[in-house]
Image (cartoon, helix red, strand yellow):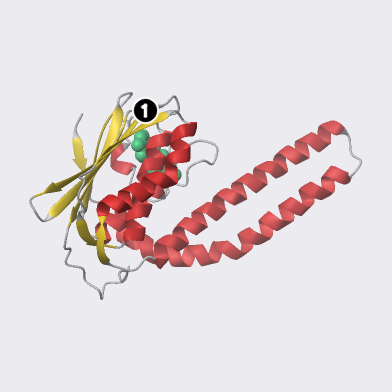
């Protein structure tokens, strides 16, 4: 397998675009959702033949699911557009990793996934926005879980490198990523997940967070063997506070 360093120019424009798109979409979506739900309830009480009723209910369920999916996109976009530099503090990255893992422990259990944590015993302080780093880890962890529908192992590794950097690896034994789609996975809205499960925004958000921490992200993957995401972050990033994304 090859390791890919991905540099995506498009990413900066997502921040600007997202604020607009999110607000444009949010209001009509709420109307559609409410209306669809009301209609579904009303139809359940009407006297129409059973076949018709089932068909209509199925169609309405699709409307509701699809609308909820759009809602998820909007929430992600809003989250993205709100993220700004400014909540940076010295944080123990070991604790941030542990918190992220606690939040997904239920998913691990449900999916028969073994967790391996390989992190130093001592605190490792880095100057970061802990909430964003936690969000970044959860997005990668959830992707790993979804890549292991028949169970497997999720390993999270933390290492200090070059005395001024840390490296986090999120390693799974999942389905892997075909080489031809690897260059696209960080693009906003790129998803291979079926039936409205994916929004394709997870890794775009991850990429933005890494970028804001002056870090790097790379991915190495082998189909049917698994995927490793490697995030390298400086302990003391030179953050430009004037830069608003
Ligand atoms: P989403 O999860 O909504 O599809 P992401 O941006 O998080 O959006 O991921 C984009 C795509 O990258 C996924 O649809 C999947 O094809 C691929 N991907 C990401 N992480 C993994 C992983 N750990 N294993 C396999 N494929 C992955």
The image quadrant of residue 235 is bottom left
- For the point 89% across and 39% down, the residue is 48
Can the viewer see residue 8 in this picture? no
Label 1, secondary structure: give it: loop
Q: Quadrant of residue 191?
A: top left
Q: Is mark 1 within 8 Å of ligand 1?
A: yes
**Quadrant in the picture for the C terminus:** bottom left
Total numbered labels: 1
- For the question of whether residue 44 can be seen, the reply is yes
Quadrant containing ligand 1: top left
Residue that extends furthest to the bottom in the rendered view of this protein? 242
At 71% from the left and 44% from the top, the residue drawn is: 60
Vertical placement of 109 versus 218: above or below? above
Side (left or right) of 125 relative to 201: left
Residue 85 placed where, x, y %? 30, 69
Residue drawn at (21%, 46%) of the image = 121
Disc 1 marks which residue? 175
Residue 17 at x, y = what percent? 41, 64
Mark 1 crowdedness (10 Å alpha carbons): few <14, some 14-19, many ≥20: some
**Which residue occupies the extreme right position in the image?**
47
- Relative side of 76 to 2, left or right: right
Q: Nearer the viewer, residue 148 or 61?
A: 148
């Amino acid at each position: 397998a090859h390791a890919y360093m991905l540099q995506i120019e498009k990413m900066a424009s997502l921040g600007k675009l997202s604020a607009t798109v999110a607000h444009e979409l949010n209001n009509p979506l709420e109307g559609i959702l409410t209306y669809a739900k009301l209609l579904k309830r009303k139809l359940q009480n009407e006297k129409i033949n059973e076949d018709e009723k089932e068909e209509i209910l199925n169609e309405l369920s699709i409307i509701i699911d699809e609308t909820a999916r759009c809602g998820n996109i909007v929430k992600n976009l809003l989250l993205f557009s709100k993220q700004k530099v400014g909540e940076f503090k010295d944080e123990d990255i070991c604790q941030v990793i542990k918190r992220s893992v606690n939040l997904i422990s239920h998913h691990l259990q449900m999916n028969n996934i073994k967790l391996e944590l390989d992190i130093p015993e001592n605190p490792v302080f880095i100057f970061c926005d802990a909430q964003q780093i936690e969000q970044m880890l959860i997005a990668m962890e959830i992707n790993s879980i979804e890549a292991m529908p028949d169970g497997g192992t999720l390993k999270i590794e933390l290492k200090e490198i070059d005395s001024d950097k840390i490296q986090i690896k999120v390693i799974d034994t999942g389905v892997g990523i075909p080489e031809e789609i690897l260059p696209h996975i960080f693009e906003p809205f790129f998803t291979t997940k079926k039936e409205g499960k994916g929004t394709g925004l997870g890794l775009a958000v991850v990429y933005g967070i890494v970028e804001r921490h002056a870090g790097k992200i790379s991915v190495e993957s082998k189909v049917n063997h698994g995927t490793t995401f490697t995030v390298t972050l400086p302990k003391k990033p030179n953050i430009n506070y004037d830069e608003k994304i």
